[in-house]
Image (cartoon, grey):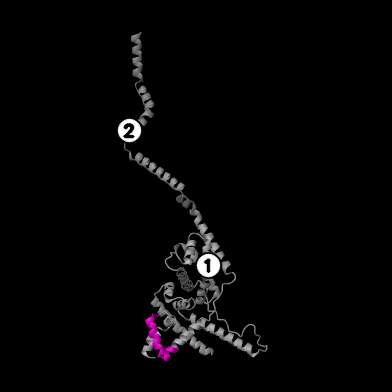
Amino acid sequence: MHEDPHIQLMLRFQDGDEGAFRELFDEYKVQLLNFIYRYCQDKRVAEELTQEVFLRIYKTAATYRPEAKLSTWIYRIATNICLNEIRTGKYKYELEQKPVSRGDDQQLHEPADQKTIEKTDEKMQAAEQQQAVRAAIAALPDKQRLAIILCTYDQLSYSEIGQRLGCSEGAVKSIIFRAKMAIKDILKKQFSRIQ
Amino acid sequence: MMRQCKQYRKHLPAFLDGELTEALSRKVQGHMDGCDSCRLEAEQLRLAVDALLTWEPVTPSADYDRVFWQKIQRVRQQQRKEQRPLAWLRLLFNTRYGLAASAALALCMCVLTVLTLRTDSGQPQGPVAADMELLLNMEVIESSEALEHFELIQMLDVLQQEIEG
């Protein structure tokens, strides 16, 4: 008997319990969506790809063997989909280049007090920072991008990242070193331009 | 940058992620305590990671679940359609009735094959079959013998009548 509740759900689903699949879907949908969204940076594409991951889980559930954590298996599927489906051009995406404005709520012709201006400037700075972060991640090669997302947002250890990307812990250390150095350099340039 | 710094800098991201062994971690920390340049590099890396964390997560769209379960519904229908032609075969092989029917069919095939081989081989039939054939044809044989010697029997009948008369 497996202690991992997610593995138990998967085994129940293998036995024909559709409710167990529904529970798995609810458990993983948001984190998978964000993982894929940070990779492709297009919410519509990310939603389609996340659904594709769950459809694949649904269709290939019989092939799952409870040898590793269920999340490892699910993220392997998600990684393959990210790398293959996008590479083959089935899903086209472009980096969302949202223009940074002074906020929808502020009418430029209306007189604004000092506090409002400061608040708006903070908002703009935050938006520009987010834009810079997205551009820095988008500039990374595929594997570095996936590794940095798993490391930073999913807070996984190097060993777990290796399992999900299908490479050794040593390779992950090297990939993350290169990714973080690249991001640091890009952000340094971006922020010196912004400030 | 000193040569020593280069060696330590390759461990900086793993150091900040807490992924180094205790011994190596102590070495890196010891080096940074005495090296302003590496300390600044580590600080910039930490700031970069902090900046990454400002990227807000997204939430699924309002119709996300509905669209997904519609897709699942279509997959189920497709799976049912693919399974239908094979359903009777599965039933046949999965139930004891199916097994009994299969066994009976196999037995019939064996008997038929043996009989066909025996008929085709042209070998003499066994005693039981030969006797059966003789019995069925006895009447015909008897009548044909009677026909063959009909004239002789008639002459013998005439002679017997003359002697008696």
The x, y position of residue A183, in whole percent, is 47, 83
Asked whether residue B75 is in view, the answer is no
Q: Depth check: A7 or A175 in front? A: A7
Q: Nearer the viewer, mark 1 or mark 2?
A: 1
For the residues labelled 1 and 2, the Cα–Cα distance comes to 77 Å
Identify which residue is drawn at 53% across, 62% down.
Answer: A19
Which amino acid is tagged 1?
Phe
The residue positioned 39% from the left and 84% from the top of the image is B26
Q: Residues within 10 Å of mark 1 (few under 14, many from 20)?
A: some
Q: Position of residue B52 (x, y in %)?
A: 50, 81
* Residue A100, image quadrant: bottom right
Q: Looking at the rendering, which quadrant does residue A175 occupy?
A: bottom left
**Furthest-left residue in this view:** B123
Report in which chain the residue with disc 2 lies: B
Magenta-colored segment: predominant secondary structure: helix
Quarter that holds the C terminus of chain B: top left
- Residue carrying label 2: B127
**Does the stretch in magenta take in A36?**
no
Which segment is the magenta one? B20-40
CB under 8 Å between discs 1 and 2: no
